Image (tube, helix red, strand yellow):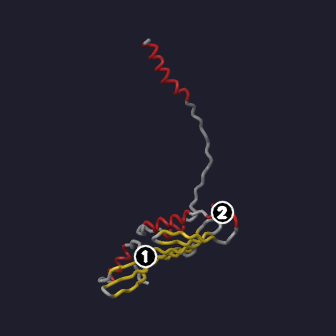
Amino acid sequence: MKKFIIGLFVIGLTSPVFAQVAEVEKLSEVVVTAVNYKYLNATDSKEVAVPVRMLERKAASYNVQDKDFYAEDDYQYYTIFFSIPDGTIVAAYNPEGKIIKTFEKFKNTSLPNAVSAAVYKRFPNWEIVSDVYRVTYNEKEGANKSYKLKLRNGDKTMKVKIDEKGEFL
């Protein structure tokens, strides 16, 4: 009886090994393309706030060709509006789904170190009350990024415009 149980145990362990037949299956080729990589390269910055980066990536990954309105009419470009509480992006796409131009506006984002350092160097006793980050992108010219800042020193207020490198405009 003991030999019989050991024999069943050995057969139970070895039979699954013979049951597995490895089949080689050839998969079809997949090509991944980033349609809006130029837009992401032009607008991306490590010091940009997370909501800004999140919305820009959403705009870059948006596929116009999957939408119902794409199949109905044939236009030269499609304008899509992206919005979150912190800001908005208005993007124009060509029929292939590539971003032609964007207008972006974000309120009260975290400022890059170059911007805040330039403001505090030029206006040492002033504090930044609010800011508006604007980006205009054009596929031929690239991105133009600027900040409109509202500064306060006691009862006095002023508005200044500065680019992302810390140069006043």
Front residue of 66 and 168: 66
Front residue of 123 and 143: 123
**Residue 2 in the image: x percent, y percent?**
42, 13
Q: Which mark is residue 114?
A: none
Residue 135, above or below 154: above
Q: Residue shown at 41%/76% (left/top)?
A: 165
Quadrant of the frame with the C terminus: bottom left
Residue type beneath disc 1: Glu
**Residue 28 in the image: x percent, y percent?**
62, 47
Whichever of labels 1 and 2 marks the residue nearer the N terminus, that label is 2
Q: Residues within 10 Å of mark 1 (few under 14, many from 20)?
A: many
Q: What residue sits right under mark 1 in the picture?
A: 164
- Indicate the quadrant where residue 94 lies: bottom right
**Residue 80 in the image: x percent, y percent?**
58, 70
Quadrant of the frame with the N terminus: top left
Q: What residue sits right under mark 2 in the picture?
A: 68
Residue type beneath disc 2: Asp
Q: Residue shown at 56%/28% (left/top)?
A: 19
